[in-house]
Amino acid sequence: MVKVAVLPGDGIGPEIMEGAMVVIKKVAQTFGIDFEFRYGEFGGTAYDSAGTPFPRETKKLVAESDAVLLGAVGGPKWDNLDRKLRPESALLELRKSLDLYCNLRPVKYYPILANKVAWKPSYLEGVDIVFLRELTGGAYFGEKGKTEDGAYDTISYTRDEIARLVQRGFELAQKRKKVLHSIDKANVLETSRLWREVVTHLNSKYPDVKVEHLYVDNAAFQLVINPQQFDVIVTENMFGDILSDQGAAIAGSLGMLPSASLGSRINLYEPAHGSAPDLAGQDKANPIATILSAALLLRFTCNREDAAQGVEKAVEKVLAAGYATGDIAGEGSKVVGTKEMAELIAQSI
Ligand code: IPM
Ligand code: MN
C-alpha cells in the first residue's frame, strides 16, 4: 500500500489535482497498484481556515505518508502577509523538513505542439533535458533580513550539500548520454567556485561522463540558441528555478512541466508552475504538469516504470489526437477544459 498525502493548495490547485486523481486512480486499477489517498490543507487556503499555511494536522499527514502530491500554492490575496505566514513559506518548509535536496524537472519537446513554441521545430527536434535543481540550500534558505534602508539574502552551500545533488546528476548522466552540464556563476560567486570544485572532484569517480561548466548567463543564452546540446543539467537552487521556467518554453507551456523533489524517504511531486489565480475555478487550467508529476511518483516512489510510462504515453496520445487546453491550443486544436483533458488521458491509459 502506497500512502499519498494529497495537498491541492490554492488557485487552480484543486482543479488540476482533481484531474491528476482521475488519472492516477485509473492507473491504480489498470496496473494493480494499491494506493491510499489522504487530503490535507496547505498554503493560503490553509492560512484562511487554520491561521497558518502549514497546519499541524497536515504535518502529521505528511509524516505518515510515503509521498506527497501537491497542486500549487500562493495568490495575491496572501502576498502582503508576513514572510513566515505566506503560502510559499509552507512550501519551503515542506521541502526543507523532508530534506528534498534534488528537484528533478524533465523538459521535453512535443512535436505536436510545434506551433506553440517560439523556435523553429528543427531547433527542438529530440530535445529531452532533465534539470536537477538543488532545492534546500542557496538564497532560499540562507540568512535574510531587512533594515530601515536595506535588505539582504545570503547564498551559502556546504561541500556535502553540493556533492549529494551533483552525484545524482552524474548517476543520471551515466544512464543517459554521459554528458553533464553544470551551471554556476564561478566568475563572481564564491559558492559557485566551490560548486565547480566539487563537480570537478566528483568527475574522477565518473570518468566516463563528460562535464561542461557553464556560467548561468551563458546557459540562459545557450538554452535559447542551442537547446539540443543539453541532456542532464545540475545547478543551484535559484539558477534552477529560473532556468527551468525558461526550459518550460521548450515544452510549449508551463502547464506541461512536472517535477519530483527527491530526498531520502518521503518525496514530493508537484507541477513546476504556480497557482494561476486568474484561471482558478474556470475549468481552464492545464492538468498535464500535475498528471506527469503523478507519473514521476509512479516512477520514483512506486518503482513502477511500466505505470509511469503508461501515463506519459497516454498524455502523448491525447495531445497527438489534437486535444489541448487553452495554453497549448493552436490552429485546429480541439480545445477542452481541465476535467475533460484529465478524463481523456485516463481513458487512454
Ligand atoms: C517553483 C516555485 C517556487 C520556487 C515558489 C512558489 C516558492 O516557483 O517551485 O519553482 O521558487 O521554488
Ligand atoms: Mn519556479
Image: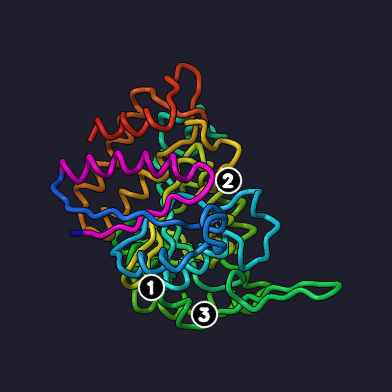
Left or right, residue 275 beside residue 63: right
The Cα atoms of the two marked residues, 1 and 3, are separated by 13 Å
**Pointer 3 local density, CA inside 10 Å: few below 14, some 14–19, many at least 20:** some
Q: Residue 10, relative to residue 171: is it above or below?
A: above
In front here: 189 or 279? 279
**x, y percent for residue 269:** 38, 56
Q: Residue furthest top?
A: 332
Quadrant in which the C terminus appears: top left
Q: Which residue is mark 1?
A: 167
Q: Amino acid at mark 1?
A: Gln
Disc 2 target residue: 224
Name the spot of residue 284 as percent of width and height, x first. Answer: 49, 31
Element under disc 2 = helix
Residue plotted at (54% across, 60% down): 240
Looking at the rendering, the stretch of residues picked out in magenta corresponds to: 2-30
Indicate the secondary structure of the residue bearing disc 3: helix
Callout 1–callout 3 Cβ contact below 8 Å: no
Per the rendering, the mark at residue 197 is: 3
Residue type for callout 2: Val
Q: Can residue 271 be seen by looking at this rendering? A: no
**Residue 131 vertical position relative to residue 327 in the rendered view, above or below:** below
Q: Position of residue 255 (x, y in %)?
A: 48, 40
Left or right relative to 89: residue 310? left
